[in-house]
Structures are given as C-alpha cells and as structure tokens.
Image (tube, grey):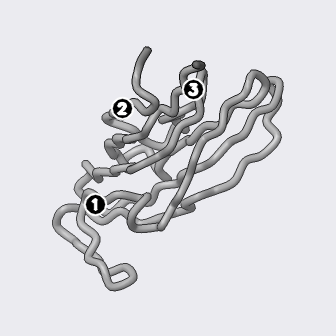
Amino acid sequence: MGAFINYLSNPFTGLKNIPQVVIKTTTNSLWIQSLMITNTSQDDIRINLQFTRTVNGVITLQSFLAYNFLIPSYKNPREYKNTTLFNTLDLVDVLGIKKNLEYTSTLNESLIIYSNGLTQIFDCDVSYALLNELPMN
C-alpha cells in the first residue's frame, strides 16, 4: 500500500499560444499546490489559465482562472497587489487560486494554459498532490 498522498509535478517547457493541458485527473482527485510560470521571452507576455470539466466525455464546464494575465520579462518587474512580479511567479499564490481537480469514473477535470501570441514563450511547472484512496481495514 502506498501513502495517502503522493507529491508530484508536471514540468513543461517552451509553451506558447497553443492550449496545453498541464494537468488532468485520470485516476484520482488532485490538489493543486503551485503553478509556477516562467516568462522565457525577452518581453512581457500574457497568459490564460482555463479550467475544464468533462462528464462522460462531454465538456460541461469551461472557465478562466486567469485571463490575459501579465507575466513580466526578467528585465521589467511589475507591481501587483503589493507584490513585485518577476519573470517567475506562482499563479496559485499570486491569484489566490485554490483548486482541487475531482475525479470519478464519469468525471474528469483539467487545467489548460496558453499565451496570447506565438512569440510569448513560457515554461510551466505544476506541483500537486495525488490523493490516493484510504486503505480498507
């Protein structure tokens, strides 16, 4: 038997304006702990983070957790809600995103991320906890 919680991460590099699923429930529910974004472009970029719920293979809900959100370049830090944003930031921390992704035999949830342009390149690392079922006695 494994632990009740396994801590894992999904790293992605070179993401652009093509929507990319960065995490999806396939066997168990997930607890998103951090979503680190690094702007690897020379200029500021804008990113979009979308939540999707699928029931029996049909999308039933899509919503934006972040839309057109500014990620500054390394040479141009910005202020946001009394915090200085650099080219790497945690969207969970900065935006206060508290998200669990649910899983059942008929329900899957996922997070999709993309930028607003072909030259707006970034890396993403999703840290999460895989919530395993409790052992039966």
**Residue at point 33%, 46% (across, down):** 122
Residue extending furthest toward the left? 75
Identify the secondary structure beneath mark 1: loop
Identify the secondary structure beneath mark 2: strand
Q: Which of marks 2 and 1 is nearer the N terminus?
A: 2
Q: In this view, does 7 lie to the left or right of 107?
A: left
Is residue 31 placed above or below 20 in the rendered structure? below
Residue extending furthest toward the bottom? 82
45 or 99: which is nearer to us? Answer: 99
**Other-residue count near label 1 (Cα within 10 Å), few / some / many at <14 / 14–19 / ≥20:** some
What is the quadrant of residue 10 in the picture? top left
Alpha-carbon span between mark 3 and mark 1: 44 Å
Residue type pointed to by label 2: Leu
Which of the two discs, 2 and 1, sits closer to the camera? 2
Identify the secondary structure beneath mark 3: loop
Q: Which mark is residue 34?
A: none
Residue extending furthest toward the front? 137
**Residue at point 60%, 21% (across, down):** 27
Contact, CB < 8 Å: mark 2 with mark 1? no
Q: Which mark is residue 133?
A: 3
Where residue 11 appears, as percent x and y from the top left, is 33, 33
Which of the two discs, 3 and 1, sits closer to the camera? 3
Residue type pointed to by label 3: Glu
Circle 2 is placed at which residue position? 8
Is residue 66 placed above or below 133 in the rendered structure? below
Contact, CB < 8 Å: mark 3 with mark 1? no
4 or 59: which is nearer to us? Answer: 4
